[in-house]
Structures are given as structure tokens and as C-alpha cells.
Image (cartoon, rainbow, N blue to C red):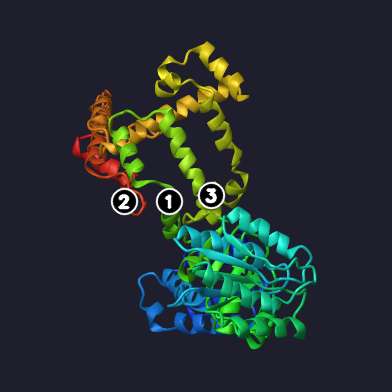
Amino acid sequence: MATFGTLSDRLTETFRNLRTKGKLSPADVDGTVREIRRALLDADVALVVVKDFTAKVRERALSDEVSKALNPAQQVVQIVNEELVAILGGEQRRLEFAKTPPTVIMLAGLQGSGKTTFAGKLAKQLEAEGHTPLLVAADLQRPNAVTQLQVVAERAGAAIFAPEPGNGVGDPVQVSKAGVEHARRQQHDVVIIDTAGRLGVDAELMKQAADIRKATDPDEVLFVIDAMIGQDAVNTAKAFQEGVDFTGVVLSKLDGDARGGAALSVASVTGRPIIFASTGENLEDLEPFHPDRMASRILDLGDILTLIEQAQQAFDEEEAMKMAEKLANEAFTLEDFLEQMQQMRKMGSMKKMLGMLPGMGQMKQQLEDFDEREVDRTEAIIRSMTPAERRNTKILNGSRRLRIARGSGMTVTDVNQLVQRFEQAAKMMKTVARGGTPQIPGMGPMGKPGASAKRGKKGAKNKGGSRSGNPAKRAAENAGIAMSNSTPTGSGFGLGGQKAPTEADMAEIQKLFGKN
């Protein structure tokens, strides 16, 4: 996740230095804690949170759970991970729905924090879960705020209640109250109220938000905060907590390149859980916030569970079974490959998916250099083929490949490379589907029986006795050959084998064979 990129790099480097030590001294622990403190402060985490966090890490790192551990460095990483989870909220918290519909969700926050966009994202997600949300345009202060919400609602496919034109006209409290009544009449089970924000915290903003809360009695009050806001996040969150008393936090713009200290500060300072994380501009870019998974991402340990969940949403189980059967029966074609690519696209950005894998923080430059348009080029080449050519690449002669290259706007070399990669991948997947070990290009066959034995037989021809005419020399050389065959040339610790014969040894051999 881009927001925590710098913090992740600093922490990973700190732990890498720890792994070279078999036992940790108090000085090692203090040095590590010092580096963690600097990394957190540079990431704009609130000072009070940093002090509390580092004190807990130091106390646990100097305890018996580390000193008695088989791998002390790994134990320190585990401690930091657990403490990160704690300051991020501990456990995941979901939206709480009312027993009697409609469930009223009120959004609060500063202007520009992403409330209106989040309203559309939440409506789209709730619709996918089988709810019937209604968006209420209660931001009547900001210019064209009502129009923006109407556009977002249309994109999300959600209903909207906007009786007032906005731009300073209308009473937001009355609109909010009427919106809840309208939802009750029209059988909407969720109401999302988009309230007005300001460029800064002021008394008028707080009074209006408090009046809307009193009039609608919401089940959830979500405080939307920009993850890039920096050190001011804590002051803003405290002001809204005192003025409106929100029940949960939404982090927006987590895909930005800012330091992201707000995420590590707000939940700890306010005691309110983070419920959602907005990770992009599209309406699909909204994730439930999991403290443990976020901590794993920050420490470059990956987020495999989220990746699996996204794959389950994008891939059809029946289609996946059919695809596995095709692989086993050698019936996997470029048409199937194209279908798989399209399903991968449903999961979102390839960079984002790759970034969820463990250790990918160390390959940041390769991720940045990855061109998402490469998928478009591959799709263009495949779509320029006829159905017969997609099903059987063996019929692709020179003229056909030239036609495909011209049709896709690519070169013949690009077409050749795609066909070659596809055939290699299909062969490897077929081997894996049958339970075998694939032959990786450039590495030769893996685990092929008899290969080492043949090499051994060839080498044995050159291991005969010495042919020297000097009896003493011949005896010495034969003794050396026998020793090399009976003893290993190296040890399991890489310390080397037997030493070469000394001059005294050679003299003893000469005496043995009667040579003075």
C-alpha cells in the first residue's frame, strides 16, 4: 500500500539488521526501538501513540519471551506486529444494522476528505450484499455538492433523495429527517446521509452535524478522514469526537503517497475502530478494514487473505473447475487464457494484487516498472486471431502471424513471444495438474531419475590408477586417489575436507616401498 511505503521500508531494514544476531542484548533492543521510534515519527504518527507503542515493544522485547526464543529477531518482529494490530484497533469491526429498518448511517468529516465518494462506494457495496440503500444529499453548503452526489449515485446504481438544489439553499436538518421518512415509505433498508464539511473545524460545522444526529438518531456515525492529513489528524478526530461523537472511522486516499500516520493515530487516540479503508478512485476500491492484515502489509508480510477473498469474488467456482479439467486434458487454449485474463481484471490493479504478496516491498522498483497496459496488448493480439487459431497455435505460420501483428498494432516478434510463453505455461500447468514437477525454462528437468548416475559413470573413466613409471610417485598418487574417493571433499558447514599430503607423509610412503 503506497501510503505506508516509506514506513514499511524503514521497519523492514531495521528487522533485517536484527536477523544477523543470534542473541539480542539490551543495547540491540534499544537500538531497534530507537529506529522504530524514528520511523513512526517520520510517518507522522502522533507523538503520544509513538511513546506508548515503543514503550510496550521495549518492555516485551527485554522479557523472557524473547531471551528464551529460538529465533529472537523473529520474536521481536512478532511483538511489533501484535502491537501494531493493537494500535490499529485490535479486531475488525463491521457495520451494525438496526433491528428495525431503515439503518441510518451519517457521514461526517472535513471538506475534501472524500465523504461524497465514500457514500457512493458504500452504497455500491451494500447493494452487492443485497441491501437497498438510499443516498440523502444533506450537504447544501458546498457548491455543486448535490450534483456530485447525484452523479455518484447514478454510477453506483443507487437511489438518491435530493429535494433541495444546494449551493446554500435549504435546511440540511430538515432534508436529513425527510430522507429517513422517505426511505421508510419506499422500503429502503439503509439510509446514507452525506453531510456538509468545512475547510477547518468550526463551531457552525459541529452544531449542524450535532443537529442532524439529534434529528435522525443514526445507528452509525462514520468519521471520514484523509489518510494524507498528517499530524493534524489527531486534533481533527478529537474535535469531531467531542462535537458529534462518531462510532467508527473511514480512512480515505490510502492509495496516496503521503506518510499515512493518521491510520496509526486515530484509532488509538479516539478509541473508535476503523471500519473501512478507501484504496482508490473507483467505486469498487473500498475494503473492510482488518487491523491484523494492515499490520502485515506495513511489515511487508503480505496480505494473502484479502487476495484470496478478491479472487473468490472475481472467479466463478464452476468455471475454475472446468478450467482445471481442461488443463489436465491438454485442452487449454488461448481462448481460455483470454477468459482467465478478463477474470483477473475484475480483481483490480495487477500492481495492487502483487503488492499483497509477502516480501514484495523489496521489489518496489519492479512493481513500479510493471506496465498495466501489457495486459491490453496481450488481449489485442489474441483478439486479432481467428477462433481456429486461438484453439490451435500450431497452425500459426508466418503469414498468419504477420496478419495478427498488423491487426493488433504489434510486431511479429511480439506475437511470437506471446505464443512461445503461452505454450511453455500450458505445458507447465498441464504437468502440475497431473501431479508432476514442471520443467522450469533455463533450469532443465527437475528430479529426473538416472541423470546423476550417468554423469557419475562418465566421470569414473577418468578415475583410474596412476600410470607413472616411478613406483614411489605411482604409489603416492594411488594413495591420494583412494583417499579422495573415500572421504568427502567438504563438510556440511563449508569448512573443507582433508588436507593435502605433507612432505613427511611423502617420505613415509617412500620408505614403505623401499625407496631412499
Q: Does residue 174 appear to the left or right of 221 in the view shown?
A: right
When asked about the image quadrant of residue 435, the answer is top left
- Badge 3 crowding class, 10 Å Cα cut-off, few under 14, some 14 to 19, many 20 or more, is some
Q: Is residue 163 visible?
A: yes
Q: Label 1: which residue?
A: 311
Q: Amino acid at mark 1?
A: Ala
Of the residues tagged 2 and 3, which is closer to the observer? 3
User: Residue type at mark 3?
Assistant: Gly
Which image quarter holds the N terminus?
bottom right
Q: Quadrant of residue 406?
A: top right
Between the residue at mark 2 and the residue at mark 1, the CA separation in whole angstroms equals 47 Å
Along the line of sight, the residue nearer the viewer: 111 or 63: 111
Q: Are marks 2 and 3 in contact (CB under 8 Å)?
A: no
Q: Is residue 316 shown above or below 107?
A: above
Q: Position of residue 235 (x, y in %)?
A: 69, 82
Secondary structure beneath dot 3 equals: loop
| x 48%, y 85%: residue | 59
The residue that label 3 is drawn on is 348
